[in-house]
Image (cartoon, coloured by chain):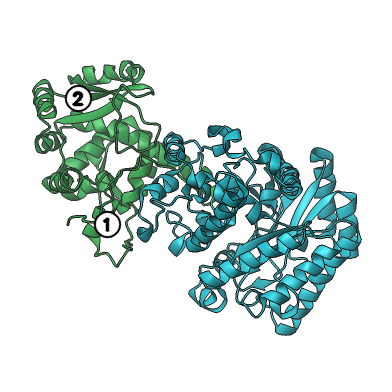
Chain colours: A cyan, B green
Amino acid sequence: MTVELRPLGVSCNLQCQYCYQNPQRDAGNLLRSYDIDRMKEAIRAEGGPFSLFGGEPLLIPIEDLEALWSWGLAEYGSNSIQTNGTLISDRHVQLFKTYKVQVGISLDGPDELNDARWHHTLLKTRDSTARAQAAVERLCTAGIPPSLIITLHRNNATLDKLPVLLDWVRYLVGLGVRWVRLHLLESESRVIREKYALSTEENIAALLAFFDLQKQLPSLHCDVFDDIRRMLLGQDNSTTCVWNACDPWTTRAVRGVEGNGQRSNHGRTNKDRIDFVKADRDGFERYLALYHTPQECGGCKGCRFFLMCKGQCSGTALDGDWRNQSEHCEVWKRLYATFEQELVVEGHESVSLSPRRREIERAFLDAWARGENAYMSQLIPQSTYDRASSEVDWRTALAEIAHEFHASLGAGERLGVP
Amino acid sequence: LEYPDRLDFTLPDFTRFRWVSDQARTHWEPRLQRISEVWAQVEWRSVCAGVRRCALVPLTPRQLVAQAAPWIAQGLVMFPLAVETGSTQPYASNVPSASSEGAEVLRIVIGAQSAVGHFKSAWAAGDNEAMGELLGYPACWRTFFAEVWVRRVCVDTTWPMASNTRRPEEHIIAVAGPKPWANVLGRWFGVRADAQRLIEVLTEKAERLLLYMYPGYSDEGFESFVTRLGLTIIRRADAGDAALIRA
């Protein structure tokens, strides 16, 4: 688990149209200063290591970055950062190498495909996009290829734009980029949703196109596909937080530390414009309620993929109400069904089709009622669902190894936003 | 109002708090804790003050030993009605039976001997109306309880309470007001809005109750408590250290 360190909170040099942190910025809940000693103390208390996060973490002076990373390297052996990439300079690249900083860059594509990541004017936006793109290329050249977060929306993933986006990813993979996290657009603003959100069909088409691309490019890993496959196999022990009954009041996969040392949750769950302090204990009421609530009422009752999806991320819940299922329910359901079919063809048994599914669901409900989370990997003898494991191709095996490596770096959460 | 679309399950109790900042927590948590502690005293002191005939309190055996002496000194008797499992929640709607795991808690009724006898009978008969009356709850409370908690089986009364104040607009009831003590959500952290209700409904008795409560609390703490409720303290010359309070 990685600590998300946000020295300046949600302060950012860009004004990405769909950013889930915008309501907090609109409310003026911004940090304008930070205290390095307090941050270090809080990181130690959380048990580190940490990933610099924002807003845009490269807004802080380079001397302070160096102070944090030199300390991070000494304490934890490596560092990481999630940035929009527009401010990366040669000096930053040097620091990344010196202090073993894994870099994640949020970028939605080349040129106009990235226009939703707005920067005051179209001219500045395009210029910032070019600088971010150049930063990705520079990092690849320097031998430290970044991971990417790409948010799919109408500016980059409609049927007419998707080929351009895929070509761009293909080009970056050729440079050395390996890890890509795909986000479906989620915004609290009706105007933004109407302008940028893809339809369910478009989202599915875009995701499946990326899945095809991943099949073509052995070194490309979009963690969502690996996750879905692993969840169907009951191998949930190193999958990302969105599938694992995250409690929006504690977001246990994300331990935020603000510039003043205050602990915070993953910001995507904040729908009230406030970075709430973590609750003292986990709760699973969302998942108990989802299991029993009919799908037409915002729940997951009767869904055979509930054990895998669990309503997905509470930060994407319908109507901004964390109690509901994800607004992208249909997208995930279709994706799970696609992968389920693929597993069947390969001779694997998917938990979703298992005669033991109800029994496993009951074990989850019992654990949640006790205030504990449950994991399929602890409940199911893995041999049951992994009987074809000896036949698994080298790519799956490699993906698993990479996944574990990624998890050991806390990267499952490191890539979390914005 | 019935709930034709009610789902066929009940969630276990869950009450958790989130603070908007560490600073807010540092500032408010101890104060709310003190109010909550005072309110626990009010439960039985109100009986001594003659505001109501009985009080119903949950206590561990250890707490009972520690707290029983003043009740006896005041001429009160007590009777354990049930052995329950203490909830780990700050607020619990469902009280598990003692067969569940967890610390045992005694549900105790306190009052004068005859009142305790009546309460015991009402408890055994499940007579909520009689119990409510003995606990000093006004008729409107008892009606609400019978309708919402008993008949409609609502374990969370927040929505019906709020909708009594303002008509719901689709899925939202926006309840605003200058009186912080009217915030019904205070009950979740142990600050029941009952104090204000008592003052509104039973002004004379409520004054006596608060007068009685006052000696058990430091002057500074009590004033803070009263101020928090948005009340005014009027010093009364012949009341010595006591204070008369008006909403």
Q: Nearer the viewer, residue A348 or B54?
A: A348
| Residue depicted at 80% across the width and 63% down the height | A173
Position of the C terminus of chain A, as image quadrant, is bottom right
Q: Is residue B221 above or below residue B125?
A: below
Quarter occupied by residue A23: bottom right
| Residue depicted at 70% across the width and 42% down the height | A391
Quarter occupied by residue B226: top left
The circle on residue B110 is 2
The subunit carrying tag 2 is B
Q: Nearer the viewer, residue A89 or B237?
A: A89
Crowding around mark 1 (Cα neighbors within 10 Å: few <14, some 14 to 19, many 20+) is: some
Give percent across and percent down for residue A399.
Answer: 73, 48
Q: CA distance from mark 2 to mark 1?
A: 31 Å
* Residues under numbered marks 2 and 1 in contact, where contact means CB atoms less than 8 Å apart: no
Mark 2 vs mark 1: same chain?
A: yes
Q: Is residue A13 above or below residue B122?
A: below
Q: Which callout, 2 or 1, points at the residue further toward the start of the chain? A: 2
Give percent across and percent down for residue B222.
Answer: 36, 39
Report the amino acid beneath label 2.
Ile
Q: Is residue B213 left or right of residue A118?
A: left
The subunit carrying tag 1 is B
Q: Nearer the viewer, residue A93 or A368?
A: A368
The circle on residue B162 is 1
Would residue A4 be seen by someone viewing this image from the given angle? no
Report the amino acid beneath label 1.
Ala
Q: Is residue A246 left or right of residue B174?
A: right
Would residue B42 be seen by someone viewing this image from the given angle? yes
Give percent across and percent down for residue A240.
Answer: 62, 49
Quarter occupied by residue A252: top right
Crowding around mark 2 (Cα neighbors within 10 Å: few <14, some 14 to 19, many 20+) is: many
Give percent across and percent down for residue A91.
Answer: 90, 61
